[in-house]
Image (cartoon, rainbow, N blue to C red):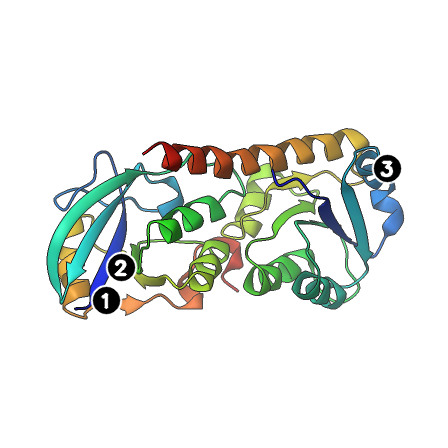
Amino acid sequence: MENRMLSILLASREHESLARFAAGLWQKNDIELLHVDSAADGLKSAERDTVDLVVVGEELTDMTPVEFVTQLVRVRPTINCAMVSNLSHDDFHEATEGLGVLMQLPPNPSGADAEVLLQKVEALASLFTRRVEKGAEK
Amino acid sequence: MARVRIAIPSEGQGGLDGIRAGHFGHCDVFTFVDLEDGQIMEVSTIANVEHMQGGCMVPVNLLAEHKVNALIVGGIGMRPLMGFRGVGITVYHEDQRAEIRPVVNDLIAGKLSVISDNQVCGGGNK
């Protein structure tokens, strides 16, 4: 991964529901956390700021999480995304297919969930790195 | 001379006489067809990268780095489509035929349409 802070945007109307998750993130070094309540502010932040990852809670003030992510991928498709959802695995996949969501998080996600998500971000970054290294060998 | 590189998500070994993969993100290889003034000059393949959930921008970057100009898909999600648009790769839609050669010929003949937002796969199609 690049040697700079990982900027994570938490988008949720209910900050408290992501408190344990955020606490898990805070324990890590080189992570910057931003927080918005609405999709509108989330989209502005995605356009304006250097956001690497968006974590979407179960509710926003102005649209559904899936609607938000659908707009987000139009604005900045390079941003990775995780979503809190109590849907079954299959229903979540159906609802978000094509949006490239990195991880479904359970309601009231924990610090351990944050750890798993960061591992997935790391694994994804390593795919880019390995590919670049392979290309350099040719 | 107008040089164009077309990419086709492919199964197995790929190649001009190969079979297309139904979804670009899960293909085995990408077949590259290089055109010059509408004539096929060279055909090559590259392996796709490992696929993981949420990793649909990895092949976007892969094709951009290989200077692909156009991609022919049978299916693609909204996020990778936006990614391809962002890097200047035009995405064409053809979901009827499995063979690579005829769709390449159709693209050369100008018979394929650029994919529209309402043709993307899944939940992003709203």
Kind of residue at disc 2: Glu
Real-space Cα distance between discs 2 and 1? 7 Å
- Tell me the mark number nearer the camera, choosing from 3 and 2: 3
Up/down of A3 relative to A70, above or below: above
Query: The disc labelled 1 sits on which kind of residue?
Result: Leu
Query: Marks 1/3: CA distance?
Result: 51 Å
Residue visible at 58% across and 44% down in the picture: A91
Q: Chain of mark 2?
A: B
Q: Secondary structure at mark 2?
A: loop
Binning the other alpha carbons within 10 Å of mark 1 as few (below 14), some (14 to 19) or many (20 upward) gives some
The amino acid marked with disc number 3 is Ala
Where residue A31 sits, quadrant-wise, is top right
Q: Is residue A56 left or right of residue B91?
A: right
Q: Secondary structure at mark 3?
A: helix
Q: Residues at marks 2 and 1, common chain?
A: yes
**Disc 3 from disc 2: Cα separation:** 47 Å
In the image, which disc is placed on residue B94?
Answer: 2
* A61 shown above or below A30: below
- Left or right: B97 in relation to B60: left
Q: Which residue is mark 1?
A: B112
Q: Residue sitting at 35 percent across and 38 percent down?
A: B48
Residue A22 position, x and y percent, is: 83, 41
Q: Which residue is mark 3?
A: A23
Is mark 2 in CB contact (under 8 Å) with mark 1? yes
Q: Earlier in the sequence, mark 2 or mark 1?
A: 2
Q: Nearer the viewer, residue B114 or A93?
A: B114
